[in-house]
Image (cartoon, grey):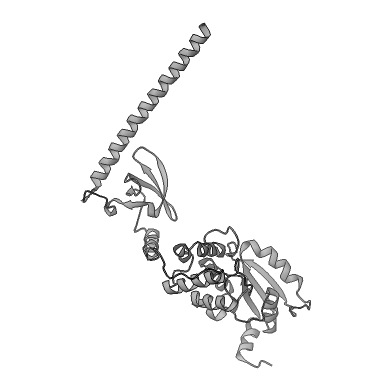
Amino acid sequence: MISSFKQYLVEETKTVYFTWGRMNPPTMGHGKLLDTLLNKARSNPYRIFVTQSNDPKSNPLKYMEKVKMLRKLFPRHARSIMSNKKIKTVFHALTSLYDEGFKNVVMVVGSDRVIEFNTLLKKYNGKKSTHGFYNFQSIKVISAGERDPDAQGVTGISASKMRYYATKSDFTSFSQGLPKNVSNSDAKILYNMVRRGMGLKEEKLFKRHLQLESISNDRENYIRGNLFNEGDDVVIKNNDEVAKIIFCGSNYVIIETSDGLKLRKWLGDVSRIDEAPRYYGGVHRKREDIAKASAERLKQQTKRREALNKEAEMDIERAKKMRRKTADG
């Protein structure tokens, strides 16, 4: 007999999706994992469990701190982020799901952990142990499509990189690893939580974080095709040289200078000519001025190259003469 609406839902679906991870601290990579979990689950319920490990080096956030920040950073998944101090291992999580009445379970993890969890979870299915007991009709472990966000060397921002930024007082880089919806104040709270957990002093002065919004906006405009396009003339910021964009990458462009040199540049390394003010004696350098300076620089470089080549040829000729004299002598 079905005694509650919750039990009715379980009886109807009988399949639950879940993930398990350290998430210490949470990053935008974890957000992608949770979104994938939701998409895989579709109409089925899903659960998010996190570890309770706590140490200064690798797990600076305490369990409840982590749960609180996860719910704040990822409000879309807040109801599915579980808070239960009795669930200390992934096996406890499975026991809990089995006790809810689910018959089938699907775990969603990074691609590098599928084999590991597939072996572990099935090993204890139907076997009573210290974690309790679970006996599912089916256990599946599927890939989220990317490596575990907690793994060392993971592409993009990982939890280990975030901890590193916290130790180096690099709030800007730390903030860039968080989801876009996170407010500046919440980013500071999490940053100082991590520092406290690592035995470091809290920080009250946060340098250059205001720059993040413009960088983010530039990236958005670039993706929409409103910033740079192939064929655009741009100015290289560090030397004022004019170049043409020949390829637009994901977050970079490949440019070609007037002397045929092809260079890869990040979006922040170049500017549109009409947005590249350079002041010398208070006078703005216009497009034709920049182009003229670039042409003059190329002319000087060509002269120097020719002079060096001529000097090298003379050195070679002198060396040949010396060899002939030595041979004749």
Q: Is residue 217 left or right of residue 159?
A: left
Q: Which image quadrant is residue 97 in?
A: bottom right
Residue in front for this viewpoint, 142 or 280? 280
> Residue 188's image quarter?
bottom left
Residue at left offset 38%, top offset 58%: 222
Direction from residue 292 to residue 45 in the image, left or right: right
Percent across and percent down for residue 115 are: 69, 63
Residue 65: x and y in percent read 55, 77
Q: Position of residue 322 (x, y in %)?
A: 47, 13
As drawn, 244 above or below 134: above
Please tell me whether residue 21 is drawn above or below residue 85 in the rendered image. Answer: above
Question: Residue at point 39% right, 39% down?
Answer: 261
Q: Nearer the viewer, residue 105 or 123?
A: 123
Residue 316 lies in quadrant: top left
Q: Total marks drawn?
A: 0
Q: Along the horizontal axis of the image, is 117 left or right of 193?
A: right
The extreme top residue here reads 329
Can residue 44 be seen here? The reply is no
Task: Please identify the quadrant where the N terminus is shown.
Answer: bottom right
Vertical placement of residue 246 versus 130, above or below:
above
Can residue 160 be seen here? The reply is yes
Please tell me which residue is depicted at 35% across the width and 30% down the height of the picture: 304
Residue 164 image position (x, y, % from top left): 54, 62
